[in-house]
Image: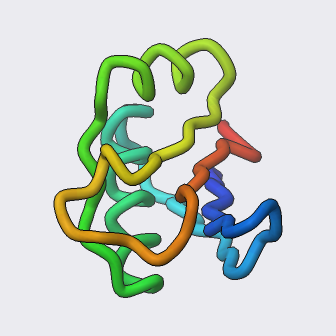
Amino acid sequence: MFRMWCKIWKDNRMIKDTVIERPEEDTRTHKVFHALEACCYEFDLEQPIWLDTVVKEFKRHSKARFRKDSFIEDINFDFLEIQIIEED
C-alpha cells in the first residue's frame, strides 16, 4: 500500500488535508504523480510544476512543498505539502 498525505498551509496553519492511497502495483514515481493528481483534484487545484528545488527536497526527505512559484495560477495559501507516509 502506498499512502501520501497532502496538506494545504496558510499562515502557519494547516487548512486542508487528505490522505491518498494507491493500492496498485506501479513504480514509485507513477504512484507519486497519480497521488498528487488525485490530491489536486480533491482540493480543486491545478497540478503544480516540479521545480528542481522541489525534486531535490522530495528525493532527500520524501516530502515536498509546492509554493506559489510552482503554480501557474494564483493560489490563496502559502504552500501545498506532500509527504509519503507509507510505502510497500
Residue at 72% from the left image edge and 80% from the top image edge = 15
Q: Which of 21 and 54 is in front in this view?
A: 54
- Residue 86, by quadrant, is top right
Residue at 60% from the left image edge and 52% from the top image edge = 81
> How does the figure colour the protein chain or chains?
rainbow
Q: Which of 56 and 73 is in front in this view?
A: 73
Above/below status of 88 relative to 53: below
> How many numbered marks appear?
0
Residue at 38% from the left image edge and 71% from the top image edge = 75
Say left or right for 63 vs 73.
right
Whole-percent x, y for residue 28 in the image: 44, 33
Above/below status of 12 relative to 29: below
Whole-percent x, y for residue 35 in the image: 44, 59
Residue at 32% from the left image edge and 45% from the top image edge = 69
- Residue 42, by quadrant, is bottom left
Above/below status of 52 relative to 66: above
Say left or right for 11 vs 1.
right
The quadrant of the rendering that contains the C terminus is top right
Q: Which residue sits furthest left?
A: 72
Whole-percent x, y for residue 47 in the image: 26, 61
